Image (cartoon, rainbow, N blue to C red):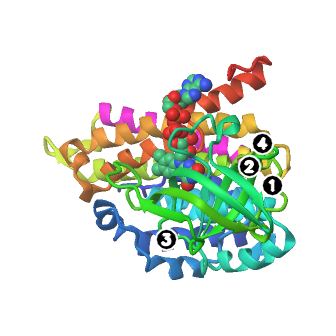
């Protein structure tokens, strides 16, 4: 008999409480039932399946770790498992959700006033309002900490924003985009809730991506875009506050990498048992088993690493370098696992219908976003050596 395909070899999911496990399995069932059958269709057309939003809302998992505002106040560990379950089937879906629940809601949760939280978080928790997060610019990616060129200037009760933002996920259709801009007067980075109807706000879809094609990324142009003072994030006083949001979400990206790798491993395990050459399943050959075991070893190391990472987050002892190490290690191993999996599919590995081609492509985006390998390595390097290599 062929054993069940399961990438959780050390049974980490079983350590969750009954209540948490139920939420994890509900998300798994949703991803398998609603997303798996449609992912390749939308991916190949680079379109977003808007019909999934109300169904995803029923899962009641947005802003999972936040307290109040309709959010459940659950553990970072459970949130990690959710990110993994989503990416295990489709990394675009987990990215859409991560932008909404982590980057956009997180900016308001960590940096908004009480009124701003009351106004936006309950609706965003129900996915009735969709958010985006605008930090990266056409000429400023890794160097966002000191280099933002988008500006804001106070004018009476309003602020005037000018500049461009690139790669902004969900922003072609989001109701609000959190825009980070440098104040021309005090030179500090401030955050703004920019509504899609604000005059001077233009979001154009970025075309021809080869990864995460379901995610709608925008090039945003702000031309004398007027934002009322009441929509400035009241607790965002400098880039340190922006960094607080990124610290929280970087652990989630490591979990996404684990999900993408786990999906790729499970696809390979199922395929190699089904595919026969020389009269036997290819899974019965030694070289194939060696590759599968290499993948499983990496995957298991990744899972145990992010498991501990989230425990540290829940104990409030997580530092930037902890999240950065997990992001570097897990995205590197993810790349290797999706490549091995594709290899085991032979020619079928480049056909979208077998799913793995989408995983290989999508892994490239996860590898680069929310801090590249180099930038996260430098964060860890600074912590362990005491020398900053950034300057
Ligand atoms: P660059 O910063 O130009 O880097 C290019 C290369 O140079 C990299 O290999 C980098 O590691 C290396 N490098 C740079 N500086 C150093 C250094 N000091 N030492 C050594 N090497 C260095 N941004 C948002 O604000 N919101 C979003 O919603 C969002 N979504 C995204 C979705 C996708 C699919 C992608 C691909 C990106 C998204 N981004 C988003 C932007 C993303 O965070 C950036 O792409 C990322 O931070 C890297 O910046 P960059 O692409 O400009 O690369």
| Residue 198 picture location, percent across and down | 60, 71
Q: Which residues are magenta?
A: 287-308
In whole angstroms, how far apart are the C-alphas of marks 1 and 3? 25 Å
Q: Which residue is mark 1?
A: 236
Label 2: few (<14), some (14–19) or many (≥20) C-alpha neighbours in 10 Å: many
Residue behind mark 4: 187
Under circle 4, the secondary element is: loop
**Residue ID for mark 2:** 242
Determine whether label 1 and label 3 are within 8 Å by CB: no
Q: In this view of the protein, which residue sits in the foreground, 305 or 39?
A: 39
The first of marks 2 and 3 along the sequence is 3
Hey, which quadrant is residue 288 in on the image? top left
Q: Which residue is mark 3?
A: 173
Q: Is residue 156 above or below residue 118?
A: above
Q: Secondary structure at mark 1?
A: loop
Mark-to-mark CA distance, 3 and 4: 30 Å
Can residue 216 be seen at all in this image of the molecule? no
Above or below, comparing residue 38 to residue 13 in the picture: below
Left or right of 329, for residue 115: right
Discs 2/4, front: 4
Calculate the distance from the C-alpha at mark 2 to the C-alpha at mark 4.
Answer: 15 Å
């Amino acid at each position: 008999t062929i054993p069940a395909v399961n990438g959780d070899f050390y049974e980490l999911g079983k350590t969750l409480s009954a209540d948490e496990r139920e939420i994890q399995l509900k998300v798994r069932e949703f991803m398998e039932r609603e997303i798996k059958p449609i992912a390749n269709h939308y991916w190949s057309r680079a379109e977003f399946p808007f019909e999934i939003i109300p169904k995803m809302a029923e899962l009641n998992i947005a802003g999972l770790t936040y307290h109040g505002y309709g959010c459940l106040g659950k553990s970072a560990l459970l949130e990690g498992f959710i990110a993994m379950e989503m990416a295990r089937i489709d990394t675009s879906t987990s990215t859409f959700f991560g932008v909404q629940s982590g980057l956009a809601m997180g900016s308001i949760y960590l940096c908004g006033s009480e009124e701003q939280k009351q106004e936006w978080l309950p609706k965003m928790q129900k996915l009735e309002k969709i958010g985006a997060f605008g930090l990266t610019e056409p000429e400023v990616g890794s160097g966002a900490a000191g280099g933002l060129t988008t500006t804001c200037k106070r004018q009476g009760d309003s602020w005037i924003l000018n500049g461009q933002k690139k790669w902004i996920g969900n922003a072609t259709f989001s109701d609000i985009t959190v825009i980070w801009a440098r104040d021309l007067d005090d030179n500090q980075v401030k955050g703004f809730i920019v509504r899609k109807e604000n005059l001077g706000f233009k979001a154009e879809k970025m075309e021809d991506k080869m990864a995460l094609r379901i995610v709608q990324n925008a090039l945003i142009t702000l031309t004398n875009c007027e934002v009322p003072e009441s929509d400035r994030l009241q607790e965002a006083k400098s880039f340190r506050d922006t960094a607080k949001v990124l610290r929280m979400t970087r652990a989630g990206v490591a979990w996404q990498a684990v999900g993408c790798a786990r999906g790729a491993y499970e696809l390979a395990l199922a395929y190699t048992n089904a595919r026969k050459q020389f009269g036997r399943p290819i899974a019965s050959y030694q070289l194939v088993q060696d590759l599968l075991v290499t993948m499983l070893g990496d995957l298991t190391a990744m899972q145990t690493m992010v498991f501990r990472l989230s425990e540290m987050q829940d104990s409030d002892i997580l530092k930037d370098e902890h999240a950065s190490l997990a992001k570097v290690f897990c995205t590197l191993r993810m790349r290797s696992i999706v490549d091995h999996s594709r290899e085991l599919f032979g020619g079928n590995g480049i056909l979208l219908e077998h799913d793995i081609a989408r995983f290989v492509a999508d892994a490239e985006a996860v590898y680069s976003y929310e801090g590249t390998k180099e930038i996260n390595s430098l964060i860890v390097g600074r912590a362990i050596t005491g020398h900053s290599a950034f300057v």
